[in-house]
Image (cartoon, rainbow, N blue to C red):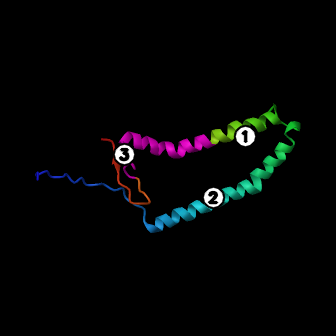
Amino acid sequence: MSNVRSAVATVEYAPEYSHAERIRFVVLGSAIGAMLVGVCQFWFFPWMREFSASASCRTVLGFSGNAVLFYGVFVGIPLHAALLVCVLVGRRGYRVLRQGRVPPEGERVFRRTPRCSRS
């Protein structure tokens, strides 16, 4: 037998959210999601249905209603979704790239998560 010592590496874990904070996230997320669904169901979708039914008869800032509808649906909505994702995820991604580890310093997690860093 050889006298080889195995090096036991200590694993660093990210700090976790408390149980009360987890519940707060679920309640707040559910409330915001319900409000967003309500606004879409009772205002945006009826307005979009009415606008699309008469788009060929309208002009918006000098552009035909059909062009506005087409560019709004196929350019405007995806562009706004991409910008929203960039704003929400981009800052964290930049911190991960700059620090070279996941999750970055100062970020708490929901489950016990070891910090993974570049080697």
Q: Which numbered circle lies on residue 33?
A: 2
Q: Are marks 1 and 3 in contact (CB under 8 Å)?
A: no
Amino acid under disc 1: Val
Q: CA distance from mark 2 to mark 3?
A: 31 Å
Residue type at tag 2? Gly
Q: Main secondary structure of the magenta part?
A: helix
Task: Report whether 67 appears left or right of 95.
Answer: right
Near mark 1 (Cα within 10 A), the count class, few <14, some 14-19 or many ≥20, is: few
Q: Which residue is mark 3?
A: 101
Which residue, as the protein is rendered here, is positioned at the far bottom?
20
Q: Which image quarter: residue 58?
A: top right
Mark 1 residue element? helix
Residue at image point 68% right, 41% down: 77
Residue 97 in picture, x, y percent from top left: 40, 40
Q: Nearer the viewer, mark 2 or mark 3?
A: 3
Instruction: Please name whichever residue, 50 or 2, is drawn nearer the observer in this view of the structure.
Output: 2
**Relative vertical location of residue 73 with respect to residue 35 in this rendering, above or below:** above
The answer to whether any part of residue 42 appears in the image is yes
Q: Which mark is first along the chain, 3 or 1?
A: 1
Give the magenta part as a residue range: 81-106
Q: Which residue is mark 1?
A: 73
Earlier sequence position, callout 2 versus callout 3? 2
Q: The residue tagged with tag 2: helix, strand or loop?
A: helix
- Identity of the residue furthest to the top in this view: 62
